[in-house]
Image (tube, coloured by chain):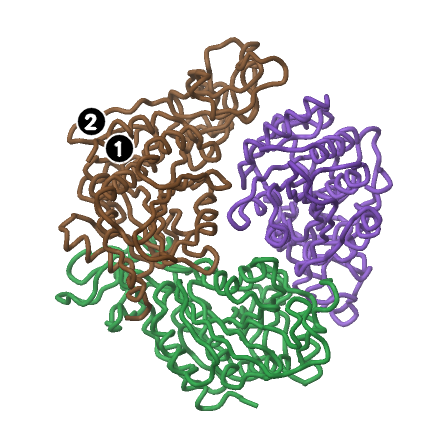
Amino acid sequence: MKQLIQKLTETFSPSGFESAIREVIKQEVQPLADEVRVDALGNLIVRKGAKAKNGKRIMLAAHMDEIGLMVSHIDENGFIRFSNIGGIRTGGLLSGRVQFTNGTQGLIGVERDLFAAKSPTFSQYYIDVGATSAKNCPVKIGDVAAFKRPFLELGQRLVAKSMDDRIGCAVLIEALRALKTSPHELYFVFTTQEEVGPRGAATSAFGIDPEIGLAVDVTLTGDTPKSKYMAISLGKGPAVKVKDTGMLSDQHIVEWMCSTAEKKRIPYQREVLDGGSTDAMAIQMTRSGVLAGCLSVPCRYVHTPSEMVDYEDVQNSVKLLVALISAPLNL
Amino acid sequence: MPTIGNAQLKLLEKLCNACAVSGDEGEVRSIVMEEIKGHTDEVRVDAVGNVLVTKKGNGKSPSTSLRTSQPHLRVMLTAHMDEVGFMLVADDGEGLFRFETVGGMDVRQLPGKAVVVGREHLPGVIGARPIHLTTAEERKQKISLDALRIDIGPGTTKVKPGDWATFATRFQRSGPSVLAKALDDRLGVATLIELIKHAPPEIDLLAAFTVQEEIGLRGSRVAAYTFNPDIGIVLDSTPANDLPDWEGEENIAYNTKLGLGPAIYVADGSTISDPRLVRWLAETGTASKIPYQFRQPGGGGTDAGAIHKTRSGIPSISVSVPHRYTHSAISIARIDDWKNTLALLQAALANLTPDLLASERA
Amino acid sequence: MTEILPFLKDLISAPGLSGYEDPAANIIADKWRPLVHEISRGTLGSLQGLRRGTGKEPRPSVMIATHMDAIGLMVTGITDGFLRITRVGGVDVRVLPGTPVNVFATGAGASGTGATGAVTSAGEANVRPPLPGVVAQPSAQLLPDEARDGPVALEHLFIDTGLLPQKVSELVRVGDLVSFAQPPAELSGETLTGHSLDNRASVAALTVCLEELQTRPHVWDVWAVATSQEEVGAIGAAGSAYKLRPTIAIVVDVTFAKGPGASDWSTSPLGKGPTIVIGPNIHPALHKSMKELADKLEIPYTLEYTPSHSGTDGWATQVAAEGIPTLVIGLPLRYMHTAVELVALKDIQRTGRLLAEFIARLGPDYMDKIVWDK
């Protein structure tokens, strides 16, 4: 699974430009699926199984896009100004490396004000791709880039860019691989444009019209020095979301997830997140409403180029997801 | 081929001088209904006040739409009828009314402006405290909305809270430019009317003149749900902040520039345009030698933000005529940019086939 | 007409926070069952009662939406037996210190069913008594410098249940709900105070309307909907509007009554009838129609001006699916989103009566009048 995670996290696909990661995932899921299709917003929709007695139509969503940067101007000396795609933290920008979808690489610099007392604003950063004029700059307005960082193993912990939410994609792929039988009509959806929306989840959910929607995404932790309080730690198991900034999980989904974890003796944590939301928010509001929840993989340093998860949490997430979708369900 | 001549400028003038603040689009709606009469296959006003127009194509192309199996595409074009403005919310007596802004406005743009109020366009002003009575400290502060009133003069009963108001600016021409209020988005409305009158036969043209764009893209959302088109194209007008930088540095945040042609959107705060549509418009512009520019990616939003997320997703893009001084009493746009916007859309719609959507979104 | 007060007092004594409306929904369902022909729950928890009209099928329908969810708090973690909390809906943190609350504990120790834990939380409030508690503001020495004087941020507030840390850990889980514990009280001048009158006072008005309709024939179908999750984004109303596709929608929600700290143009007098809202969120012909009716019946009302977002379920219902002509009615209420909200009972009665009169007059051709640009 680590190889898969490495492959997924080292692919460049910011929101709205997911074709590269979609091809990687398609290769993985094609042999395992009953049907694979791509919708208007580029979501990869993978169907497995049909509804049996006590079965439901269930949508599982992990977003395959990542945060990134988009060229907004190239100045006369070839320096690139950019706007953000998704919630970029300025704190992690300086001297970061980026790669454009056409392969061009560059680094991030900042205007002189850096040395002033105030931290620089977003518009003070620029990308240097080695160009010397607007003419010889190898990218143009509207081109997109993502952070470049190699995958890294630190003992039990895995570090990479775009762990948010390629780790969710990995969990979905491995769950699909491990699934033996299911009474449910299952849709494994690798969604687009979560970091700017969630947009892809909204349209794919409308098309699928599920009875139950479950996002698999990362959540924050409260286990680093002087971090904001949060009762989630790395290594204590996957998290069952009760609430985040954008959504209240359906209470029956929460109890279904908790009791399944307890039955299977899989460690889990109950999550209340202040700051952020997931695809589940969009799924819940589809048509006349969908019962929705979220299985979260605890992750440190979210929305920086080095996001960290615990490998055991990841494996337990797969286990929990497989257990959830294997058994009949009455809500 | 239609282009922008005196008749079109007259229409734009009429549209800009009309008052249609979000939620009160009736005046522009009436002009639209009048203009498109006889040019449509079907027209109706929906539950929120959008004007929905269908103009069927007769064109056949070698390929078929994947979604509808039709030999041509169903293309929705939208332009919003509403403009930013004011609503009177309390009668302070003596012809003075407290008001709120409708849509995103910079309150610093308001003091000392003439306005018109209500259905009868009753004239009024937004005054300000005489400078003689202000202190040096006070002059450093913004004048807040709380301190402003719309004054229509005492003694009339023709105006009441709940009435809408907007700037009293009258349309003018000046050399290559037009000066008017509400160019955002009467330029789009006028363009869409021209496209209906000269609809390309290759497509089913579904035109939506939308309401309530300025307060949350609300009309376009239900219009897109109703039409459920193959493609959504939003005709809007976007700011050109192409003024000098205060330090004399290169202006790197101009959004668009006047005179460079229609602005094609790659991404804004509400939408990442379908890359297939971006390529199509840009390639059409290049091939037809029509100038165009890419709007700088970043914030802001258009009706595309609602449209592309409708139902199972609708490939969408926005094209704007640039204008300076957005959401203020007087905006300025270039007639040539408008001309080229219409030309680009005409050329692009004429070469549009279902093949464009045959491959997956990039 | 039956007296609405006991029902409303019952209703605002129940929790029923956003997303966990069962306790409120059950009380409402019991009250509505004899008043409607069918009753059901929407996917996301809205309670939907149908009174069939006498018209020929397919009949037009009017949806009256009043949200039943309440704001409150949720447990985010436990530190030394003190509960850490976040908000469910728009709670003003400054009114929290010293507020009595109920904690709906769902941990294993609370149910006594062993290690597998409990099944639901507030839904079983009637069988499992909540833990009483108080919102605690730590003393200045325990807070960061900037919080010593000004308002104390939610992240620094706790709930103290008086129980020992070990017991708290057994009883309380992350995600457990906390509601205000303020009991209802009748004040002078036929006014009622309590928490969650936003928006259960409007539920009561809708109930008055349904009672009136028992003796008033109506042509249209009536969907009485107590919506869920309004306080977190009009989620339930959006779903119900999409599902039921009413011909028109009327949303009743509380609005700011004149009172201490709220006396400017944007407020309406308490006890002088409902407000009829004007603005982009409202179909102007519906507004006109309701206003003319109130004038005719001499039911007092005030006009309320909302230049853009009405801040109610109406914002979502208007743009559901292909769009729904929507009207918003306001019920004046003081001290919104505190534990001591205050309404005038007369306003509830009048609102209910106005709704019933409106519904009774909806003829088969009514929609011919609901057009633009007249």
Q: Which residue is mark 1?
A: C342
Badge 1 element: strand
Residue lying at the far right of the rendered structure: A3
Chain shown brown: that is: C
Residue A255 is left or right of residue C186, and the answer is right
Chain shown purple: that is: A
Nearest the camera: B121 or A65?
A65
- Discs 2, 1 touching: Cβ within 8 Å: yes
Q: Amino acid at mark 2?
A: Leu
Task: Using the rendered image of the protein, determine whether residue C305 is visible from the camera's viewpoint.
Answer: no
**Where the N terminus of chain C falls, by quadrant?**
top left
Of all chains, the one bearing label 1 is C
Vertical order, C98 against C282 (above or below)? above
Residue drawn at x 61%, y 59% as measured from the top left = B313
Q: Quadrant of residue B251?
A: bottom right
Q: Position of residue B218 (x, y in %)?
A: 46, 60
Task: Find the distance from the CA under tag 2 to the CA under tag 1.
Answer: 9 Å
- Label number found at residue C187: 2
Q: Amino acid at mark 1?
A: Leu
What's the colour of chain B in the image?
green
Vertical order, A218 against B190 (above or below)? above
Along the polypeptide, which appears first: circle 2 or circle 1? 2
Q: Position of residue C262 (x, y in %)?
A: 27, 41
